[in-house]
Image (spheres, rainbow, N blue to C red):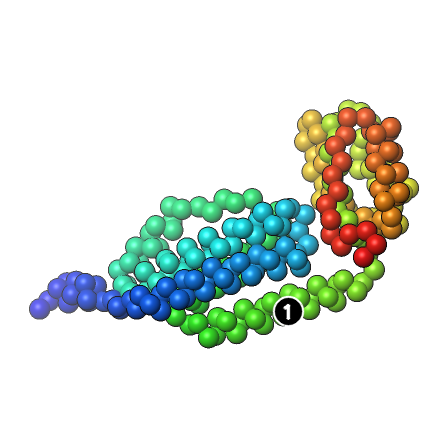
Amino acid sequence: MNKNETLLEFFSTQGAEIHYGLFLINFLLAALLAQVLGLAYARFGHALSNRQLFGRNFVVLTMTTMLIITIVKSSLALSLGLVGALSIIRFRAAIKEPEELGYLFICIAIGLGLGAQQTIITLIAFVVLLGVIALSHWVRGREAGPNLYLTVSSPRGNGTGLPELLAGIKRHADAVKLRRFDETDSQIEASFQVAFNDVGQVEACLQHFRTTLGDTRVRFVDDRGIGN
């Protein structure tokens, strides 16, 4: 038997039988852990995007990752084929916050662990990660700071700029932090973390934008709420 035949036999016999009962249990467990992670992201996350909507992707991503790992681990040939497949696939989701990328990596890690049938270590790591996330949120929540996200979108050419936006918000808010600023040829958009103690301050800020900035879109997103 020459070397080519030996190598061909190695690839054809390389494989491991999949235990279907264990696979089903881990598959359902992946969905459960991803759902819990999505709830944790909606509760403890600080991203400006819609966290509930983004968290719905966790279940599909985690279960898909586990399915891929379960299949390719049974065959070295499939593993090598996966490398070639991934070379032509590009993940182009718009990730605007580093926090979103971190949670996506957690989903992938859960899928990898359960797909490799490392159930116990995956569960332990998941519980520890949730504890760290909750503790970080609790420590940060004790700090006084902004309690709402404010996004202002306005067309250019009406005298609106970043200094005017900051000055208008500071006039009515107790604290303000600039989080993101985007500018195009026709529009500017700025996102802030602001601190309001009551609804009256919010209404005063809105009235200021209506009277001074004209055609401007203002959006408030809850972070810790007013009065919490």
Is there any visible trace of residue 105 in the rendered image? no
- Which SS class for mark 1? helix
**Quadrant in the picture for residue 79:** bottom left
Q: Determine whether 129 is above or below 172 in the image.
A: below
The residue furthest right is 171
Q: Position of residue 78 (x, y in %)?
A: 28, 58
Q: Amino acid at mark 1?
A: Val
**What residue is at 41 percent from the left and 62 percent from the top?**
27
Q: Position of residue 55 (x, y in %)?
A: 57, 52
| Front-lying residue, 95 or 29 | 29
Q: Is residue 173 left or right of residue 81?
A: right
The residue furthest left is 1
Instruction: From the image, tell me which residue sits under label 1.
Output: 132
Q: Determine whether 179 is above or below 156 in the image.
A: below
The residue furthest top is 157
Q: Position of residue 182 (x, y in %)?
A: 69, 38
Q: Circle 1: is it few (<14), some (14-19), or many (20+) Cα within 10 Å?
A: few
**Quadrant in the picture for residue 44:** bottom right
**What residue is at 23 percent from the left and 67 percent from the top?**
14
Q: Determine whether 41 is above or below 210 in the image.
A: below
Which quarter shows the N terminus? bottom left
Q: Is residue 66 left or right of residue 127?
A: left
Which quarter shows the C terminus? bottom right
Is there any visible trace of residue 196 in the rendered image? yes
**What residue is at 37 percent from the left and 57 percent from the top?**
68
**What residue is at 83 percent from the left and 33 percent from the top?**
209
Q: Is residue 23 left or right of residue 179?
A: left
| Front-lying residue, 209 or 40 | 40
Q: Is residue 49 left or right of residue 24?
A: right
